[in-house]
Image (cartoon, rainbow, N blue to C red):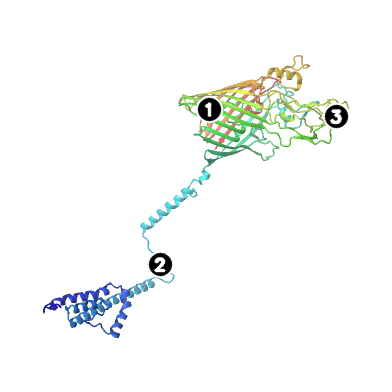
Amino acid sequence: MFKKRAHAEWRALPLAVSLGALACATPAVGQTADQAADQAPAAAAKRTDTKKPKVSSTKPTSSNATVNLVNLLVQQGVLKEEQAQALIKQAEDEAYVSRQAAKDATAKADDATKAATAAAAAAQPPGTRHVTYVPEVVKRQLREEIKQEVMAKAQKENWASPGTYPEWAQRIRFHGDARVRYQGNYFPTGNDQAGAANYNAINTGSPYDISSNAFGPTYDATQDRNQFRFRGRLGMEADLLYGFTAGLRIATGENSSPVSTNQTLGGGGGNFSKYGVWLDRGYINWQTWGDDLRISAGRIDNPFWSPTDLVWYKELGFDGFAVQAKHEVWEGFTPFVVGGAFPIYNTDFNAGNNLPVDPNNLNSPPSKFPSHDKWLFGGQVGFNARFSPEYAFRFGVAFYDFDNVQGQFSSPCRISSASDVCNTDLTRPGFAQKGNTYFPLRQIIADPIGTGNNGGQINQFEYFGLVSQYRPVVVSGQLDLGHFHPAHIVLDGEYVYNTAFSRSFMNAAAATYGVLMNNRAPSPDGGNTPGPFNGGNQGWLGRVTVGNREIKHLWDWNVHAGYKYLESDATIDAFADSDFGLGGTNLKGYFVGGNIGLGENVWATLRWMSANSIAGSPYAVDVLQVDLNAKF
């Protein structure tokens, strides 16, 4: 079909040889050492057992691309068959050489690996473990990364950081204080021991038989006493998040008195007997609006601001709930308001007696008394004003309503022993100090002569209740002059007025109960006629303090002096200061004292208080207190 040129086949010959060699060599070069080793025996067997492919002008196909290419060139007339056979043989020989070289290289590599393994085994005795070498710089980097990871976890969980605690533990704060005191109580001559009736001892114990020739319980008014006393308190407050906190505090104390946590050393039976502790605080608080609003419930600190102890003992705890609010309306001026309700006495659940509810029907069931709960409701408004960094003034007015505390005269009742009860016994105070005016509560039926109480001449067992009601108004003020900071001059003042007091009512009661009512003037006729009531309903206190406002550090100091005047029924005597005049109302006199720091949160205190009674029986006492204090 095509005309052949004589020189064409020789010109194509080098090209064909090159293509054939490349096609045959390429598979061999592309094989891996493993493939060459696996395929070499098969190729040798093929050369010995099968015939080599023959060039043909027909169209048989081969799996070998080189053979197919040479056959195609023969068909096109480019190559002669003899030339094609030579090319195929040359290509196969070159491929065989390449495969054999790869096989030899693989074998040598295997031998080298075995030799290296054997040398390593020979260098390491049996039992030796191979440890991969890690450069020192890598070790340091690993140590630092591990340390950072562990410390991050420890910091997050607070289980390994020095001096720290888990997150929940960091929200619990413990605090406390301890005080050792020497107290000397010195009574001058002229006190009336017989007139120092201890109404608290009567009302918290067995009733007093007023028909007896024996004196009733009295408090000491004539014999000096020296006491060494200790006070310890330990409290805990937990931050519950979202503005809530909860707290508890335990304290020492000879009894459950609300106005003293002192424990007299050697008291309670002596002989190094152990002392008891009491739950002194237990509360839940909630604060919000940037601490401008605070709601408290439980047994809490006094929520009302009082710069002196004229009305409230300074460590008195209040049972109940209170709301305190304040807000700075402009810079340096912050009004505040306080309100609360506090149960003073809750009627015993089983209060009553075992006598028939109907005296005329002995088969009637025993009687139970209606509740006679006592409450304190209070409210206070005031403000804090800071005129400059050196001068500040605080003022407040409070109103308190002691509800249901007045004693009630009973219905006629029969009394044959100290264990018998009358229907108004629950109106007597559950705790008292001294100073308020009292009267007998029971209206005892006189039995016929020769029976029972023998016409009222014996077995006249009485409890005593408060004659007056108490709704005092208290005005408080404090001026802080800090021009010589850290030394300050602080002026404190407080005034109380019982708005529920009625002098005409008190005089009428005095006429009714005669000598059974206290706080009376001397008899006008030498003892035959009881004197008139001479108590009152007002009180005031003034004090000046110079020095550090707080004693926290070594050589911090302050001194103070003041005068106190508190009439008998200006306020409830149970909650007034327990140190001045040994506690209660119906007292007047002066006091001086000072504090000095002996170290961090350690200080000494010296106080001298001289008190005299205002009304009723003559009474006077001087008290010296020397304290060593510490807090944490």
Picture coordinates of residue 54, whole percent (x, y): 24, 83
- Classify residue 260 by image quadrant: top right
Q: Which mark is residue 459?
A: none
In depth, the one of 228 and 9 nearer the eye is 9
Q: Mark 2 or mark 1, which has the lower sequence index?
A: 2
Q: Amino acid at mark 1?
A: Phe
Q: Amino acid at mark 2?
A: His
Q: Mark 2 or mark 3, which has the lower sequence index?
A: 2
Per the image, the residue denoted by label 2 is 130
Q: Amino acid at mark 3?
A: Gly
Q: What is the distance, in whole Å, between disc 3 and disc 1 at their CAs?
A: 61 Å
Residue at figure coordinates x 42%, y 51% from the top left: 148
Q: Which mark is residue 336?
A: 1
Per the image, the residue denoted by label 3 is 452
Quadrant location, the N terminus:
bottom left
Picture coordinates of residue 222, whole percent (x, y): 71, 25
The reply to whether discs 2 and 3 touch (Cβ–Cβ < 8 Å) is: no
Local SS, label 3:
loop
